[in-house]
Amino acid sequence: MKKPHLQKQDKQLYTILKKEEDKQQYKLSMIASENFTSKAVREAVGSVFMNKYSEGYPKKRYYEGNYFIDELESLAIERAKKLFKLPTDWGVNVQPLSGSPANLAVYIALLKPHDKIMGMYLPDGGHLSHGWSYNPTPEKKGFAPNIMFYKGGKRKVNVSSKFFEAVQYKTNPKTKMFDYDEVEKIAIKHKPQLIITGGTAYPREIDYKRMKKIAKKVGAYYMADIAHEAGLIAAGVNKSPVGIADIVTMTTHKTLRCNRGAIILAREDLMKKINRAIFPGLQGGPHNHSIAGIAVGLKEAMAPTFKTYAAHIVKNAQRLAKELQTYGFDIVTGGTDKHLILVDLTNKGIFGKKFARALDCAGIIINYNTMPWETRPPADPSALRVGTPWITTRGMKEKEIVVIAKWFDEVMKIIATWEESKEDVPFADFNKKAQTSKELAKIANEVKKLCKQFPLDI
Ligand code: DSN
């Protein structure tokens, strides 16, 4: 996109922007929660819609001059209804600023302070906003060994654990997958008012019907947070919780490939309360330029090409899991149903933080991650989370995945020569070494060549 004004008016910022553009163009982003939006989405986000205040909802605003904003918001709502095949008695809110505020709005709408919420244990793949808290003491590290649920720690780091009581269910220690019988037992024991599924690093599909049954049994609402899978669900590649869960929340900028923002779907009776919780409960004026970008992205997601795209995200992730396994990488749960895989690095003896740093120096951007039954601290955990939404947007397919997996192996082999015994190089030294490594720079150069064959429409 041409930015003549910025270049003339603010060279300093323009230079930073150009560097970010070049990095996005010439490195591979494999962060599972990231994607690359179309020019049309970016044009809408950068539009004059950002100049308008519009507290309230269509036709019920507290400022004049909102006739076109009403049209815009109604269009975004209609498109969300169509894309996610909403039952007629369900409604939509497109105003949440992002995923955590969307979830918080649901809690504020449906719960009283100190009511109990039950979500997935964060290190197993849950989300901070699903009630996370931990214990700062080194011997406990915030984790809950040997039991299937977690009652939380003293450090209430998220508002969801500060204002509500939280209990969290874990995955099965053997399969690292949902153990629905255990989840049911925990729900019966703790009687939460709200049960939550979804999160950031769970590679398998969730049985929404079973979860709804469990919630019903204990008289809880059931909220499915589909932030990561929204695009896959919209495309019909993953199953949908719409019409099963009581509430569905999502961010819009991951597999759904819109700009940053969030959407809440719920039965109309609940949506009335949720609307009030968003405004005036939690937010002021909606970010109309974000809603405009989301409306454009939702239209893009209705096109048949988006279905093919979403199917390819999953194919690429599944192929990547298989290829990495041939290089001796352990894949948590043995594979994936979605856009992400979790690589358990325990057998390699070099963990997520160092491997992610080295991969970045080799042109592949990724994030280190905790994994089910994690024993290491979240700032230096055992695993790597790898996602395929962005590289699939570039048009990469299985052929490129094979090459990418080979690079993972090469990078691991290079850094393994730096460590004589497990973890003996301090991180600062490791980082210096990675940044000046000719071998990693050589791979980065190959990555750049591949990226040039699959350019982003910047
Ligand atoms: N930060 C997002 C992710 O990476 O999954 C979740 O909020």
Image (cartoon, helix red, strand yellow):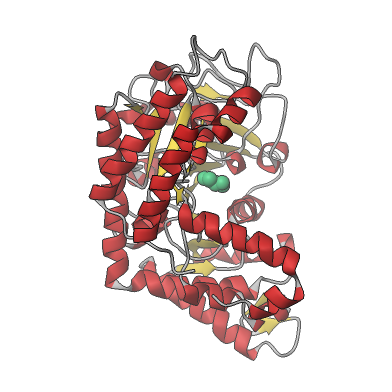
| Picture quadrant of residue 139 | top right
Residue lying at 40% horizontally and 34% vertically, measured from the top left: 342
Q: Is residue 135 visible?
A: yes
In the rendered structure, the answer to whether residue 173 lies left or right of residue 133 reads: left
Q: Position of residue 71 (x, y in %)?
A: 56, 86
- How many badges with numbers are in the image? 0
Front in this rendered view, residue 430 or 379:
430
In the rendered structure, the answer to whether residue 212 lies left or right of residue 49 reads: left
Front in this rendered view, residue 110 or 92:
92
Vertical position of residue 27 compared to residue 424: above or below: below
Location of the N terminus (image quadrant): bottom right
Front in this rendered view, residue 71 or 446:
446
Q: Position of residue 305 (x, y in %)?
A: 28, 69
Q: Is residue 120 visible?
A: no
Residue lying at 41% horizontally and 75% vertically, measured from the top left: 299
Q: Position of residue 290 (x, y in %)?
A: 59, 70
Front in this rendered view, residue 78 or 88:
78
Vertical position of residue 82 compared to residue 338: above or below: below
Q: Position of residue 265 (x, y in %)?
A: 49, 62
The extreme front residue here reads: 438
Residue lying at 27% horizontally and 29% vertically, measured from the top left: 325
